[in-house]
Image (tube, rainbow, N blue to C red):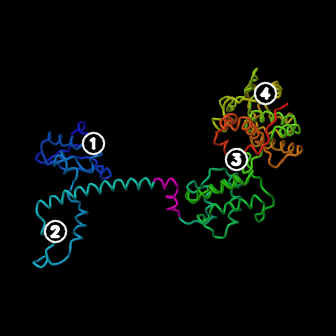
Amino acid sequence: MRNQDHPGVSVVPGDKPSYPFHMSFKHPLLKGKQVKRSTKTTDGAQAAKLAIELSTILRNPNVWRKLPAETSEVVRAVWNGEVIDQTLVSAANEARPRGWYGEFYRPDWIRAASHAALVKAANEMAEENTRLHEENAILSAKVNNLTALLRKMGFEAAREYTPKLLTQACKDFLSDDKSRCGTNAGERKKRTLQSWLDRFTEAQPAGALVHEITAQHVIEHLAKLHAGKLDGQTHKPTDETVREVAKWLNAMLEHQTGGSFRKLAVREWVRKHLYDDTGDAREAPYWLDENDVQVLMVNLPQYWRDVACVQWNGGFRPEELAYIRRENVALLKDEIRVEITALKIDGVLFWKPKTRQSCGRVHVREEARRTLTRLCAHNSFLLFPDDHAVHGGITTRWKEVEKTQERLKLWRVANWTSQYRAALRVAARKAGLDDTRVDSRTLRRSCGKRVLVEGGYNLELTAAVLRDKPETVRQHYARLLPEDVRQPQAAK
C-alpha cells in the first residue's frame, strides 16, 4: 500500500490472501536497517491503522528507547522484533551452570520458570535489547566521526603507509606517473626541484626512511644552506631561494608520508630567521622616524624618491605602487585619493591586490601633492612606468599589452621590489642608516608607526590607513612602546 498516510512505513500484503500483512520500515536503532515484520492480521484497514501508529513512533526519537504505555501489543512486537535477542540468549546459556539435571541438581532458573516470571524477564530483556541497540547506534556514529576526522588529518593515509626510502620518496614525488607524483611542475622546474631534493637526501644518513624525517631535520638542513655550510656549497643562496627550498621540502615530505609530516615548526623557523620582504612579521621590525625618512629620500634618485614619497605618505605595499594607474589618482582641493584596484585590460586580469580589504580608495597626506601632481602630468599608463630611461634600472617588460594602439609595459613584481629595495639600501647606506634592515616595506611600516603614535596608539585607525586587520597591526607593532620611539616631527 502507498504510505502517504504513514510515511516511513510500507504495508506489504502476504504471499497468499490468507497470510497476514507485513510492515516494512528502516529501524533507527539498527543503523537504519530495513526490517519486515508481521502485523498478525489479514485485514488491510487494520494493518493500515497499525502502520500509522508505527509511523508516529518513527517520527518521535524521544520514544524509541521506551515506547509509550498506550502502544498496542502488535506495534510493540513489530518494533522490538524478536523478544529475546539471540546474542543475549547465547550469553545466558554460557552463564548457566553445568552439571547433573536430575534430583541432585536443578538450576534456579528452571525452578523459577513460572509464566509470569518469564513474561517479566522477556519484557526486561526486550527493553535492555532496545537500549543496547541505541547505544550501539550512538557509538557507531562516534566511530564514524572520529574516522572522518582522522582521515582529514592524514592518519588514515599514514596507517596504510608502507616504509619507503627517502631517495625513493623523492623520485616518486617528481615522477611522471600521476598516481605517485606530488607536483604538476614542468620539466624545467622539476630539474631544479631534483637538485634541491638530492642535496637534502645527501645530507641525511644512508638508508633513511621518509617517515623518519622530522621537522628538525629540515630546519637543520635549511640553517646550513642559509649559512653556506653544506658540503660542496660554493655560495650562499638568497633568502628567497631558501624559503622556496623549505616550501618544496615540506610539500614532498607531507605528500610522501600521507600527511603525517608536520611542517609547522619549519614554517615558524622560516618566518623567524629568514629575511622576508613580503610583509610577514619579523623578529625585529625596522622603523624610521620623520627625520630619517627625509634624509633617506635626499639620497635616492628622483624616480625612486617619488616612489618612497608616495609610500611614506600613503602606506602602500610595494606591489601596489608598481600597479597604480595614473587615472586612479584624484588630486582634489582638500584631499588626495589613490584608488587601488585589480589591473584588468580588455577583460584579462594581470594583477590583483593582496586581499579584498586592500582594494579601495587610499587617503594620502598633503605632503605628497606636489610629487603626485608632477607624476600625473606625464602621459603614461602607470604612475611609475617601467622605462629604463626614467628609473635607470632594468626594464623588465613582463607584459606588453596593446591598448588603444599603445604598448603598455607592465612591471614584474619581483623585479620591481628588487630594484626598489636596492635603491633604498644604497640611500640608507649614504644616510648612515642600517641598510641591511631596509627593504621595500620599510616606509610602509614607518607610515604605520607614525599613524599609530600620532593617533594615540589607535589600532583601528592604523589598520584602516594600512588597509589591514587590527590583529595584524597588533602583531607587527607589538614592540612599539612609547619609551621605545621618538615622537615624529611635523614636515616642514
> Mark number for residue 281?
3
Residue 20 part of the magenta-drawn span: no
Q: For the residue carrying disc 3, how many other residues have a C-alpha within 10 Å: few (<14), some (14-19), or many (20+)?
A: some
Q: Position of residue 441 (x, y in %)?
A: 76, 42
Q: Distance between the Cα atoms at labels 3 and 2? A: 77 Å
**418 to 385, vertically: above or below:** below
For residue 352, say whether it is visible: no
Residue under numbered circle 2: 109
Horizontally, residue 311 falls left or right of residue 260, namely right
Residue under numbered circle 1: 8
Q: Which residues are magenta?
A: 148-161
Amino acid type of disc 3?
A: Ala
Between marks 1 and 3 in the image, the one whose residue lies nearer the viewer: 3
Q: Position of residue 121 (x, y in %)?
A: 18, 60
Labels 3 and 4 touching (C-beta < 8 A): no
Q: Distance between the Cα atoms at labels 1 and 4? A: 73 Å
Labels 1 and 4 touching (C-beta < 8 A): no
Quarter of the picture holding the N terminus: top left
N-term-proximal mark, 1 vs 3: 1
Q: Secondary structure at mark 2?
A: helix
Which residue is rendered at x = 68% and y = 60% of the image? 219
Amino acid type of disc 1?
A: Gly
Residue under numbered circle 4: 366
Q: Distance between the Cα atoms at labels 2 and 1? A: 41 Å
N-term-proximal mark, 3 vs 4: 3
Q: Secondary structure at mark 1?
A: loop
**131 to 385, vertically: above or below:** below
N-term-proximal mark, 1 vs 4: 1
**232 to 61, vertically: above or below:** below
Quarter of the picture holding the C terminus: top right
